[in-house]
Amino acid sequence: MNYADMGFKPFKICDTHVHIISPVKVEESQKTFGEIMDYFGYSRLGIMAVTTECGHNDCDHTDNLKAFYVKDGLNRNGQDRCFVYANPLYHLDGTDSADYYLSEVKELYRMGADGFKFLDGKPNMRKKINRRLDDPIYDKMYAFFEEEGLPVKMHIADPRRFWGPREKMGEYELKSGWWYGDGSCPSFEELHEEVYGILRKFPHLKFCTAHCFFLGDDIDGLTEFMENWENTSFDLTPATINFVEFSKKPDEWRTFFQKYSKRIFYGTDTYNTTLSGEMEKYERWSAPSLIRRMLEYPTDKTFTLRDDTFVPLGLDDATLSDIYSENHKRMHPHAKALDCELIAFRAKEMLTDVKARRIPCPSEEVYAIEEHNMQSVIKRFSSDELQ
Protein backbone atom coordinates (compact mmCIF):
# COMPACT_ATOMS: atom_id res chain seq x y z
CA MET A 1 0.00 0.00 0.00
CA ASN A 2 1.35 3.44 -0.88
CA TYR A 3 1.24 5.14 2.51
CA ALA A 4 2.87 8.32 1.24
CA ASP A 5 0.40 8.64 -1.63
CA MET A 6 -2.62 8.14 0.61
CA GLY A 7 -1.23 10.14 3.49
CA PHE A 8 -1.49 7.27 5.99
CA LYS A 9 0.87 6.47 8.83
CA PRO A 10 2.71 3.10 8.74
CA PHE A 11 0.79 1.44 11.58
CA LYS A 12 0.36 -2.30 11.79
CA ILE A 13 -3.39 -2.91 11.86
CA CYS A 14 -5.77 -5.62 12.97
CA ASP A 15 -8.94 -5.77 10.90
CA THR A 16 -11.32 -7.27 13.46
CA HIS A 17 -14.35 -7.67 11.19
CA VAL A 18 -14.16 -9.64 7.92
CA HIS A 19 -16.42 -12.38 6.54
CA ILE A 20 -16.30 -15.52 4.43
CA ILE A 21 -19.46 -14.91 2.43
CA SER A 22 -18.65 -15.32 -1.27
CA PRO A 23 -19.16 -18.97 -2.35
CA VAL A 24 -15.62 -19.81 -3.45
CA LYS A 25 -13.17 -22.57 -2.69
CA VAL A 26 -11.73 -22.23 0.79
CA GLU A 27 -8.18 -22.21 -0.59
CA GLU A 28 -9.10 -19.07 -2.53
CA SER A 29 -10.52 -17.46 0.60
CA GLN A 30 -7.28 -18.10 2.45
CA LYS A 31 -5.24 -16.71 -0.46
CA THR A 32 -7.44 -13.61 -0.72
CA PHE A 33 -7.23 -12.76 2.96
CA GLY A 34 -3.47 -13.29 2.87
CA GLU A 35 -3.20 -10.86 -0.03
CA ILE A 36 -5.34 -8.30 1.76
CA MET A 37 -3.22 -8.59 4.90
CA ASP A 38 0.00 -8.14 2.96
CA TYR A 39 -1.27 -5.23 0.87
CA PHE A 40 -2.81 -3.20 3.69
CA GLY A 41 -0.13 -4.00 6.22
CA TYR A 42 -2.48 -5.91 8.51
CA SER A 43 -0.81 -7.80 11.32
CA ARG A 44 -4.01 -9.60 12.34
CA LEU A 45 -7.39 -10.54 10.90
CA GLY A 46 -10.64 -11.32 12.71
CA ILE A 47 -13.05 -13.55 10.77
CA MET A 48 -16.67 -13.18 11.86
CA ALA A 49 -18.46 -16.41 10.94
CA VAL A 50 -22.10 -16.20 9.84
CA THR A 51 -24.12 -19.41 9.67
CA THR A 52 -27.71 -18.18 9.74
CA GLU A 53 -29.56 -16.15 7.12
CA CYS A 54 -29.40 -12.43 7.80
CA GLY A 55 -31.41 -10.98 4.94
CA HIS A 56 -28.69 -10.24 2.38
CA ASN A 57 -27.06 -13.65 2.16
CA ASP A 58 -28.15 -17.26 2.09
CA CYS A 59 -27.40 -19.10 5.30
CA ASP A 60 -24.11 -20.98 5.35
CA HIS A 61 -23.93 -23.92 7.73
CA THR A 62 -20.28 -24.52 6.75
CA ASP A 63 -18.97 -21.07 7.66
CA ASN A 64 -17.40 -21.88 11.03
CA LEU A 65 -15.45 -24.77 9.54
CA LYS A 66 -14.20 -22.67 6.63
CA ALA A 67 -13.16 -19.93 9.06
CA PHE A 68 -11.13 -22.45 11.08
CA TYR A 69 -9.46 -23.60 7.84
CA VAL A 70 -8.38 -20.05 7.00
CA LYS A 71 -7.26 -19.45 10.60
CA ASP A 72 -5.07 -22.54 10.47
CA GLY A 73 -3.59 -21.54 7.13
CA LEU A 74 -2.75 -17.98 8.13
CA ASN A 75 -1.37 -19.03 11.53
CA ARG A 76 1.16 -21.54 10.29
CA ASN A 77 4.63 -21.47 11.89
CA GLY A 78 3.24 -20.31 15.22
CA GLN A 79 1.97 -16.94 14.01
CA ASP A 80 -1.01 -15.20 15.64
CA ARG A 81 -2.37 -13.62 12.47
CA CYS A 82 -5.94 -14.89 12.29
CA PHE A 83 -8.72 -15.13 14.87
CA VAL A 84 -12.21 -16.57 14.51
CA TYR A 85 -15.43 -15.44 16.15
CA ALA A 86 -17.74 -18.41 15.65
CA ASN A 87 -21.47 -18.21 15.09
CA PRO A 88 -23.76 -20.82 16.66
CA LEU A 89 -26.24 -22.32 14.23
CA TYR A 90 -29.89 -21.47 14.85
CA HIS A 91 -32.48 -23.84 13.43
CA LEU A 92 -35.40 -21.39 13.78
CA ASP A 93 -37.86 -24.29 13.84
CA GLY A 94 -38.81 -24.37 17.51
CA THR A 95 -36.24 -27.01 18.45
CA ASP A 96 -33.57 -24.64 19.79
CA SER A 97 -33.21 -24.51 23.56
CA ALA A 98 -31.02 -23.02 26.28
CA ASP A 99 -29.12 -26.28 26.62
CA TYR A 100 -28.65 -26.50 22.83
CA TYR A 101 -27.18 -22.99 22.62
CA LEU A 102 -24.86 -23.71 25.54
CA SER A 103 -23.64 -27.00 24.08
CA GLU A 104 -23.17 -25.39 20.64
CA VAL A 105 -20.96 -22.55 21.87
CA LYS A 106 -18.99 -24.85 24.17
CA GLU A 107 -18.16 -27.09 21.22
CA LEU A 108 -17.21 -24.15 18.99
CA TYR A 109 -14.97 -22.84 21.76
CA ARG A 110 -13.34 -26.25 22.01
CA MET A 111 -12.85 -26.26 18.22
CA GLY A 112 -10.84 -23.04 18.47
CA ALA A 113 -13.19 -20.06 18.55
CA ASP A 114 -11.52 -16.93 19.94
CA GLY A 115 -14.90 -15.27 20.52
CA PHE A 116 -18.46 -15.30 19.21
CA LYS A 117 -20.32 -13.35 16.55
CA PHE A 118 -24.09 -12.79 16.47
CA LEU A 119 -26.40 -11.21 13.90
CA ASP A 120 -29.39 -11.58 16.21
CA GLY A 121 -29.80 -7.82 16.53
CA LYS A 122 -30.07 -7.26 12.75
CA PRO A 123 -33.75 -6.25 12.50
CA ASN A 124 -34.78 -8.80 9.88
CA MET A 125 -32.87 -11.54 11.70
CA ARG A 126 -34.44 -10.52 15.01
CA LYS A 127 -37.81 -10.76 13.22
CA LYS A 128 -37.07 -14.32 12.06
CA ILE A 129 -35.98 -15.43 15.50
CA ASN A 130 -39.03 -13.74 17.05
CA ARG A 131 -37.41 -13.65 20.46
CA ARG A 132 -35.93 -10.79 22.48
CA LEU A 133 -32.16 -10.56 22.57
CA ASP A 134 -32.30 -10.77 26.37
CA ASP A 135 -34.71 -13.73 26.43
CA PRO A 136 -33.88 -16.20 29.25
CA ILE A 137 -33.25 -18.92 26.64
CA TYR A 138 -29.83 -17.30 26.07
CA ASP A 139 -28.90 -16.93 29.75
CA LYS A 140 -26.85 -20.13 30.04
CA MET A 141 -24.89 -19.19 26.93
CA TYR A 142 -24.15 -15.65 28.11
CA ALA A 143 -23.29 -16.89 31.60
CA PHE A 144 -20.70 -19.18 29.97
CA PHE A 145 -19.25 -16.29 27.96
CA GLU A 146 -19.05 -14.10 31.05
CA GLU A 147 -17.48 -16.82 33.19
CA GLU A 148 -14.86 -17.70 30.57
CA GLY A 149 -14.18 -14.08 29.64
CA LEU A 150 -15.08 -14.74 26.01
CA PRO A 151 -15.79 -11.68 23.86
CA VAL A 152 -19.07 -11.35 21.98
CA LYS A 153 -19.59 -9.17 18.92
CA MET A 154 -23.17 -8.45 17.90
CA HIS A 155 -24.81 -6.52 15.08
CA ILE A 156 -27.46 -4.30 16.66
CA ALA A 157 -30.09 -2.43 14.61
CA ASP A 158 -29.23 -0.64 11.35
CA PRO A 159 -29.13 3.04 10.35
CA ARG A 160 -32.13 4.91 11.78
CA ARG A 161 -33.34 5.94 8.34
CA PHE A 162 -34.15 2.29 7.58
CA TRP A 163 -37.23 2.81 9.76
CA GLY A 164 -38.16 5.94 7.81
CA PRO A 165 -40.03 6.54 4.55
CA ARG A 166 -39.71 3.70 2.07
CA GLU A 167 -39.24 6.09 -0.86
CA LYS A 168 -35.96 7.33 0.65
CA MET A 169 -34.42 3.86 0.65
CA GLY A 170 -31.95 2.76 -2.01
CA GLU A 171 -32.73 -0.02 -4.48
CA TYR A 172 -30.11 -2.37 -2.99
CA GLU A 173 -31.34 -1.68 0.53
CA LEU A 174 -34.91 -2.49 -0.42
CA LYS A 175 -33.88 -5.62 -2.31
CA SER A 176 -31.97 -6.76 0.77
CA GLY A 177 -35.04 -6.39 2.96
CA TRP A 178 -33.64 -3.57 5.06
CA TRP A 179 -36.69 -1.32 5.23
CA TYR A 180 -38.38 -1.71 8.60
CA GLY A 181 -40.95 1.05 8.42
CA ASP A 182 -43.93 -1.32 8.20
CA GLY A 183 -43.74 -2.08 11.93
CA SER A 184 -43.01 -5.79 11.52
CA CYS A 185 -39.55 -5.49 13.10
CA PRO A 186 -38.58 -4.14 16.51
CA SER A 187 -37.75 -0.44 16.52
CA PHE A 188 -34.24 1.00 16.71
CA GLU A 189 -34.81 1.89 20.35
CA GLU A 190 -36.26 -1.52 21.25
CA LEU A 191 -33.21 -3.33 19.90
CA HIS A 192 -30.87 -1.18 21.97
CA GLU A 193 -32.98 -1.70 25.07
CA GLU A 194 -32.77 -5.46 24.58
CA VAL A 195 -28.97 -5.18 24.60
CA TYR A 196 -29.15 -3.28 27.86
CA GLY A 197 -31.31 -6.13 29.14
CA ILE A 198 -28.46 -8.57 28.39
CA LEU A 199 -25.93 -6.35 30.12
CA ARG A 200 -28.05 -5.84 33.24
CA LYS A 201 -28.03 -9.61 33.70
CA PHE A 202 -24.40 -10.07 32.70
CA PRO A 203 -22.65 -6.79 33.58
CA HIS A 204 -19.13 -8.20 33.13
CA LEU A 205 -19.78 -9.63 29.67
CA LYS A 206 -17.18 -8.56 27.12
CA PHE A 207 -19.73 -7.18 24.69
CA CYS A 208 -18.67 -5.44 21.48
CA THR A 209 -21.28 -3.95 19.18
CA ALA A 210 -20.47 -3.70 15.48
CA HIS A 211 -20.88 -0.58 13.35
CA CYS A 212 -20.55 1.90 16.26
CA PHE A 213 -23.90 0.65 17.64
CA PHE A 214 -25.32 2.82 14.81
CA LEU A 215 -25.08 5.74 17.24
CA GLY A 216 -22.91 8.07 15.19
CA ASP A 217 -25.71 10.62 15.52
CA ASP A 218 -25.95 10.22 19.31
CA ILE A 219 -22.70 10.84 21.16
CA ASP A 220 -24.56 10.98 24.48
CA GLY A 221 -26.16 7.58 23.86
CA LEU A 222 -22.85 5.96 22.93
CA THR A 223 -21.20 7.57 25.95
CA GLU A 224 -23.88 6.11 28.20
CA PHE A 225 -23.29 2.67 26.70
CA MET A 226 -19.57 2.93 27.46
CA GLU A 227 -19.99 4.39 30.93
CA ASN A 228 -22.63 2.02 32.27
CA TRP A 229 -20.72 -1.21 31.53
CA GLU A 230 -16.97 -1.38 31.86
CA ASN A 231 -16.42 -4.22 29.38
CA THR A 232 -18.44 -2.81 26.49
CA SER A 233 -16.78 -1.73 23.26
CA PHE A 234 -17.59 -1.12 19.59
CA ASP A 235 -15.97 -1.49 16.20
CA LEU A 236 -15.69 1.12 13.47
CA THR A 237 -16.88 -1.11 10.65
CA PRO A 238 -18.97 1.16 8.40
CA ALA A 239 -22.11 2.02 7.93
CA THR A 240 -20.89 5.13 6.20
CA ILE A 241 -23.64 7.15 7.91
CA ASN A 242 -21.71 6.95 11.19
CA PHE A 243 -18.75 8.75 9.63
CA VAL A 244 -21.05 11.34 8.08
CA GLU A 245 -22.39 12.02 11.57
CA PHE A 246 -18.89 12.15 13.10
CA SER A 247 -18.10 14.86 10.54
CA LYS A 248 -20.81 17.12 11.98
CA LYS A 249 -19.11 17.28 15.41
CA PRO A 250 -15.45 16.45 14.82
CA ASP A 251 -14.14 18.13 17.97
CA GLU A 252 -16.62 16.34 20.24
CA TRP A 253 -16.02 12.99 18.60
CA ARG A 254 -12.23 13.44 18.75
CA THR A 255 -12.50 13.91 22.50
CA PHE A 256 -14.75 10.85 22.73
CA PHE A 257 -12.34 8.68 20.73
CA GLN A 258 -9.42 9.77 22.87
CA LYS A 259 -11.29 9.06 26.11
CA TYR A 260 -12.45 5.58 25.06
CA SER A 261 -9.51 4.70 22.80
CA LYS A 262 -8.90 1.39 24.56
CA ARG A 263 -12.42 0.15 23.77
CA ILE A 264 -12.68 0.89 20.04
CA PHE A 265 -11.68 -1.57 17.31
CA TYR A 266 -10.83 -1.16 13.64
CA GLY A 267 -12.93 -3.25 11.24
CA THR A 268 -13.98 -3.11 7.59
CA ASP A 269 -16.59 -5.81 6.79
CA THR A 270 -14.34 -7.01 3.96
CA TYR A 271 -15.48 -10.23 2.26
CA ASN A 272 -13.47 -13.10 0.79
CA THR A 273 -13.75 -11.62 -2.68
CA THR A 274 -10.70 -11.92 -4.89
CA LEU A 275 -9.04 -8.53 -5.28
CA SER A 276 -5.94 -9.54 -7.25
CA GLY A 277 -5.13 -6.84 -9.76
CA GLU A 278 -7.72 -4.46 -8.29
CA MET A 279 -5.99 -3.44 -5.07
CA GLU A 280 -5.35 0.11 -6.23
CA LYS A 281 -9.04 0.60 -7.02
CA TYR A 282 -10.09 -1.07 -3.77
CA GLU A 283 -7.64 1.06 -1.80
CA ARG A 284 -9.23 4.33 -2.85
CA TRP A 285 -12.95 3.78 -2.46
CA SER A 286 -13.19 1.07 0.15
CA ALA A 287 -13.79 0.88 3.88
CA PRO A 288 -10.05 0.82 4.73
CA SER A 289 -9.57 4.09 2.89
CA LEU A 290 -12.64 5.73 4.44
CA ILE A 291 -11.79 4.72 8.00
CA ARG A 292 -8.12 5.64 7.86
CA ARG A 293 -8.74 9.01 6.23
CA MET A 294 -11.42 9.71 8.81
CA LEU A 295 -9.18 8.85 11.74
CA GLU A 296 -5.79 10.11 10.55
CA TYR A 297 -6.32 13.16 8.36
CA PRO A 298 -6.35 16.58 10.05
CA THR A 299 -9.76 18.24 10.34
CA ASP A 300 -8.97 20.76 7.60
CA LYS A 301 -8.34 18.00 5.07
CA THR A 302 -11.95 17.23 4.15
CA PHE A 303 -12.63 14.65 1.49
CA THR A 304 -15.55 13.40 -0.58
CA LEU A 305 -16.55 9.78 -1.11
CA ARG A 306 -19.38 9.14 -3.51
CA ASP A 307 -21.96 11.80 -2.51
CA ASP A 308 -20.78 12.44 1.06
CA THR A 309 -18.26 14.94 2.41
CA PHE A 310 -16.26 14.00 5.49
CA VAL A 311 -14.46 16.06 8.11
CA PRO A 312 -11.65 13.94 9.61
CA LEU A 313 -10.93 13.62 13.33
CA GLY A 314 -7.13 13.96 13.25
CA LEU A 315 -6.50 11.51 16.08
CA ASP A 316 -3.16 11.33 17.89
CA ASP A 317 -0.80 8.38 17.45
CA ALA A 318 -1.53 6.82 20.85
CA THR A 319 -5.25 6.74 20.14
CA LEU A 320 -4.67 5.34 16.65
CA SER A 321 -2.37 2.63 18.02
CA ASP A 322 -5.04 1.49 20.48
CA ILE A 323 -7.74 1.35 17.81
CA TYR A 324 -5.60 -0.18 15.08
CA SER A 325 -3.94 -3.01 17.00
CA GLU A 326 -3.24 -2.71 20.72
CA ASN A 327 -6.83 -3.27 21.85
CA HIS A 328 -7.03 -6.52 19.93
CA LYS A 329 -3.69 -7.66 21.34
CA ARG A 330 -4.94 -6.99 24.85
CA MET A 331 -8.15 -8.85 24.14
CA HIS A 332 -6.37 -11.75 22.41
CA PRO A 333 -2.68 -12.11 23.38
CA HIS A 334 -2.63 -15.31 21.33
CA ALA A 335 -4.96 -17.18 18.99
CA LYS A 336 -6.74 -20.13 20.58
CA ALA A 337 -5.42 -23.52 19.52
CA LEU A 338 -7.55 -25.52 17.10
CA ASP A 339 -8.94 -28.95 17.96
CA CYS A 340 -8.10 -30.65 14.67
CA GLU A 341 -9.81 -33.92 15.50
CA LEU A 342 -13.11 -32.28 16.39
CA ILE A 343 -13.04 -29.97 13.37
CA ALA A 344 -12.42 -32.92 11.05
CA PHE A 345 -15.22 -34.92 12.72
CA ARG A 346 -17.74 -32.10 12.24
CA ALA A 347 -16.56 -31.51 8.68
CA LYS A 348 -17.22 -35.15 7.83
CA GLU A 349 -20.74 -34.80 9.21
CA MET A 350 -21.24 -31.59 7.26
CA LEU A 351 -19.93 -33.18 4.06
CA THR A 352 -22.53 -35.93 4.43
CA ASP A 353 -25.26 -33.31 4.89
CA VAL A 354 -24.06 -31.32 1.88
CA LYS A 355 -24.02 -34.41 -0.33
CA ALA A 356 -27.52 -35.36 0.86
CA ARG A 357 -28.72 -31.77 0.28
CA ARG A 358 -29.83 -31.53 3.90
CA ILE A 359 -28.44 -28.02 4.24
CA PRO A 360 -29.52 -25.06 2.10
CA CYS A 361 -27.37 -23.83 -0.77
CA PRO A 362 -28.62 -21.51 -3.52
CA SER A 363 -27.53 -23.68 -6.47
CA GLU A 364 -25.94 -26.95 -7.51
CA GLU A 365 -22.77 -25.01 -8.30
CA VAL A 366 -22.55 -23.85 -4.68
CA TYR A 367 -23.26 -27.38 -3.42
CA ALA A 368 -20.27 -28.57 -5.46
CA ILE A 369 -18.08 -25.84 -4.00
CA GLU A 370 -19.14 -26.70 -0.46
CA GLU A 371 -18.47 -30.39 -1.06
CA HIS A 372 -14.96 -29.39 -2.12
CA ASN A 373 -14.60 -27.12 0.90
CA MET A 374 -15.58 -29.76 3.43
CA GLN A 375 -13.24 -32.24 1.76
CA SER A 376 -10.46 -29.65 2.06
CA VAL A 377 -11.21 -29.10 5.74
CA ILE A 378 -11.13 -32.85 6.37
CA LYS A 379 -7.86 -33.21 4.48
CA ARG A 380 -6.30 -30.30 6.38
CA PHE A 381 -7.32 -31.50 9.83
CA SER A 382 -7.43 -35.28 9.49
CA SER A 383 -5.15 -38.00 8.16
CA ASP A 384 -8.10 -40.26 7.40
CA GLU A 385 -9.00 -40.98 3.81
CA LEU A 386 -11.91 -38.99 2.47
CA GLN A 387 -15.22 -40.77 2.40
Image (cartoon, helix red, strand yellow):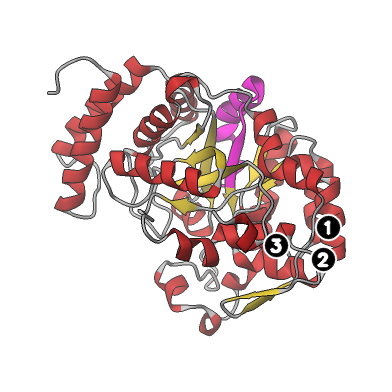
In the displayed structure image, the side of residue 53 where residue 374 appears, left or right: left
Establish if 279 lies above or below 99.
below
At horizontal 44% and vertical 40% (from top left) the residue drawn is 49
Q: Is residue 292 magenta?
A: no
- The amino acid beneath tag 2 is Pro
48, 258: nearer the viewer: 258
Neighbour tally class for label 2: few under 14, some 14-19, many 20 plus, Cα within 10 Å: some
Residue depicted at 56% across the width and 60% down the height: 287
Q: Find the distance from the CA under tag 3 to the CA under tag 2.
A: 10 Å
* Residue extent of the magenta highlight: 132-154
Q: Which residue carries the number 2 mark?
A: 250
Q: Residue at x 39, y 49 (%)?
A: 272
Task: Please give left or right for residue 359 compared with residue 260 in the image.
Answer: left
Asked whether the residues under the numbered discs 2 and 1 touch, taking CB atoms below 8 Å apart as contact, a structural biologist would say yes
- 263 over 286 or under it: above or below: above
Q: Residues within 10 Å of mark 1 (few under 14, many from 20)?
A: some
Answer with mark 3 or mark 1, whichever residue precedes in sequence. 1
In the rendering, which numbered label is found on residue 254? Answer: 1
Observer able to see residue 93: no
x and y percent of residue 292 in the render?
A: 66, 57
Q: Where does residue 382 sit, x and y in percent of width and height?
A: 26, 17
Task: Give 213 or 344, whichever is nearer the viewer.
Answer: 344
Mark 3: few, some, or many residues within 10 Å (few <14, many ≥20)? many
Q: Are marks 3 and 1 in contact (CB under 8 Å)?
A: no
